[in-house]
Image: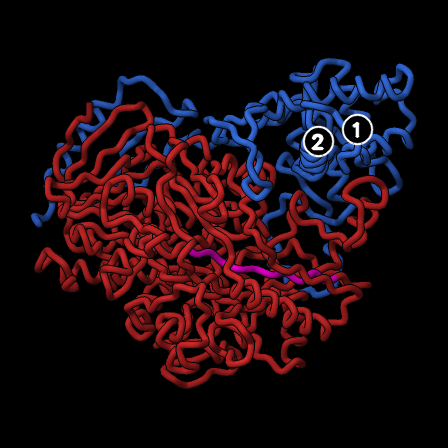
Chain colours: A red, B blue
Amino acid sequence: MARKLPRRDVVIVGLGWTGSILANELTDEGLDVVAIERGPWRNTATDFNAGYMQDELRYAIRKDLFLRPAQNTLTFRNNIDQEALPVRDFGSFLPGNGVGGAGVHWNGQTWRFLPSDFRCRSHLVERYGAKIIPDELAIQDWGVTYEEMEPYYDKFEYLAGTSGKAGNINGKLQEGGNPFEGSRARDYPLPPLEMPYGPMLFAQGAREAGYHPFPQPASNASRNYTNPLGIEMGACSYCGFCERFGCANYSKASPQTTILPVLMRKPNFECRTNSEVVRINLDRLGTRATGVTYVDAQGQEWEQPGDLVLICAFILFNVHLMLVSGIGKPYDPKTATGAVGRNYAYQTFAKVEMFFDNKNFNPFISTGAMGQCIDDFNGDNFDHSSLGFVGGAGIMCAGTNARPILMRPTPPGTPRWGSTWKKATADNYLSSLYLNAQGSSYATRGNYLDLDPTYKDRLGRPLLRMTFDFPDNDIRMINYMADKAAGIGKHMNARQIVPHYQKKPYDVVPYQSTHNTGGAIMGSDPATSAVNKYLQSWDVPNVFVVGASAFPQNAGYNPNDTVCALAFKAADAIRTRYLKNEGPLVPA
Amino acid sequence: MKKISGSTLSRRQFLASTVVSISFASTPDALARSFSGQLPWSPFAADPPTPARPGPWLFFTHDEAQTIEAIVDRLIPGDDLSVGGKAAGCAVFIDRQLAGFFGSSERLYMKGPFVQGLPQQGLQSPILPSERYRAGIATLDDYCSKTFSGRTFPALAPKEQDEVLQGLEKGSIDLGDADAKTFFELVLQNTMEGFFADPIYGGNKDMASWKMIGFPGARYDYRDFVNKHNQRYPLPPVSIMGRDDWGGKG
């Protein structure tokens, strides 16, 4: 039996990046905010310890900081003709858990999407005509423009101490930055990180090939930095333990290093940990949320009433909570109707390995987001009219680490064990590099999220079910990029260049990326989107659903800058508009 | 919306009600907590790793350990590049892992029904890693005994051992229910984990693998070297526990 708690102004589900941003903004507005987090409390001094954070087995292999499937997982199949089975151990993607969420273990790669990405369908139709878009794709516009997003991107990058070089300030191209990016109001708050040998060789090769290399924007502080909240970050030490690890050095932006020291001191904020929201409670008509019900780690069920409910969990669990709570109409792939679960998308990857003679790259000297990139083939930065695909990818030399359980490349044909394997491992560890193409993932009618009919979580709720495979369009696109990357590799004088192409079917076992997107997408039409341009539910206007769940499809970039910009945008809409007039911010 | 409602009251009520209750969390320390008004910090809240202790096998029987030691010594043979898998402690590493949460799949989703799936859906099996080792070793020794006139795996010549391991890897040797390929992949994965992980977990003795490849280990600051292109990093590796040559006696 649930015990009822006193009402709060705002109830936030999940205290990761978006929950922290919204909590800080809304407590500044004077609201009384409680955040309910399914995982434990975590902070730098206690949990990301410089004496033992460099533990690949514990954090990268046994995934100590991540959501454990025993607590919650999902089922997976490639298409509706297959039976979905549970993801018993996370592999392809690694959802976070605990205070800080995925903001604890990300790499810090901090990309804005292109202006054309936000008008994905309209832009392509205007430039090439409707026939350019393959029938299999269900790409949509975002209902928001880059120009509307710009101030919120800026806000996040200054909060996070992002290190980079602007390519376009107020419409003026800047030498050394990304010439393809949308116009920004000012440069990054910090200069780029130092460049190790490998990325420098890549930049030379890319320039020789006629492309436009620039340093990757990184929320790994290149200098000591004090952010607008007055929180101090320390300069990055290039330790090579970024992704899958917490930062012990206060260098990687996370809620812990950029928001929580201020937020936690506010008397009008409370965080409850090891407490998992079971559902959002709705009134009798189902058009207003009355709060949430959650279960704490001791098994006690609580009802937390609130006037405003912000769903700020990881994308998969945002969609899960909407489905189990009956918010919005579930998507049906047979009729392509319904909005919740629609347009689940991911990220495409191709990799080019390169083996060199007589080179030493010291690949362990690294950060999660350092490196050199080209954007010449991202989005619609290049002419697609005769290519047979839409979408694009960033191509980069941005090795994030050389932790040896997972990262010890050997040339193809090398056995996986024995003397020959050992010699090849010793010979190539310091002298190999890889290039990545990180590409767009475009939505289709058949890729979606719903509830599984068979498998249940530990609280008895149906697991989320993912139905996903790469569209042929995306396979053609990313493998074109693998060849482009290999072409740059030829300018770098490697002994051997080995492209790795993306194949179907999508496989949920090997790690690819935690850039899951969609399922509660934003848009201007309630028939084809779950939330409006302010991330407000069309169906239950006192619920906002914040995260990569709002992406109608994914662009060729890491999602977090856009995710956090959307959180600032939602916060702004709540502060300046919703509180004055509680109701739909966009007429349905 | 009314601003600043009764948060103090609710917090007090919440705390009072969570003091006495039954734990059903998967980890005993995972109590629900409430934090407000300050950045919480308490001494001794950190959770450092527990070093593997030398001593008797925790999971393997004596005979099982002999088989695993023989396997890891073929997967990683001793040569002029490094000591072999046995001397590096890979079998000890695996033993300690199987005795802990890894061996019992404690963190994984283990609810049924268990249905044979497609490869891209991942392993769908109720068999725990500890059970897979136990059955795999027994069946392997049985297979070797039948095939090599009474000799179990540790008694085979290195060349014969390599042929058996290749047979498991390719699936040409049938271990019946023990599923030769899945068993082999698990042993290979754990052996490499043990060889390349921090020595604190019982393998990678004297940081043998890190010396072999040139990985400096648990160092945390390379600012003075990031711009030194194409030069060998000069310092030797360190473990989370430091180095044997630190601190003189001890």
Residue B187's tag is 2
Residue B188 in the image: state x and y as whole percent: 72, 35
Q: Indicate whether residue A318 is drawn in magenta.
A: no
Looking at the rendered image, the quarter that the N terminus of chain A falls into is top left
Q: Kindly identify which chain the residue marked by label 1 belongs to.
A: B
Of the residues under marks 2 and 1, which one precedes in the sequence?
1
Residue B24 occupies which quadrant of the picture?
top left
Residue A526 in the image: state x and y as whole percent: 23, 60
Q: Which residues are magenta?
A: A345-354
Tell me whether circle 2 and circle 1 mark residues in contact (CB < 8 Å). Answer: yes
Looking at the rendered image, the quarter that the C terminus of chain A falls into is bottom left
Amino acid type, mark 1: Ile
Q: Residue at x 22, y 42 (%)?
A: A34
Residue B33 occupies which quadrant of the picture?
top left
Q: Kindly identify which chain the residue marked by label 2 belongs to.
A: B
Residue B71's tag is 1
Mark 2 Cα within 10 Å, few/some/many (few <14, many 20+)?
A: many
Secondary structure at numbered mark 2? helix
Above or below, comparing residue A110 to residue A34 in the picture: below
Magenta: main secondary structure: strand
Amino acid type, mark 2: Val
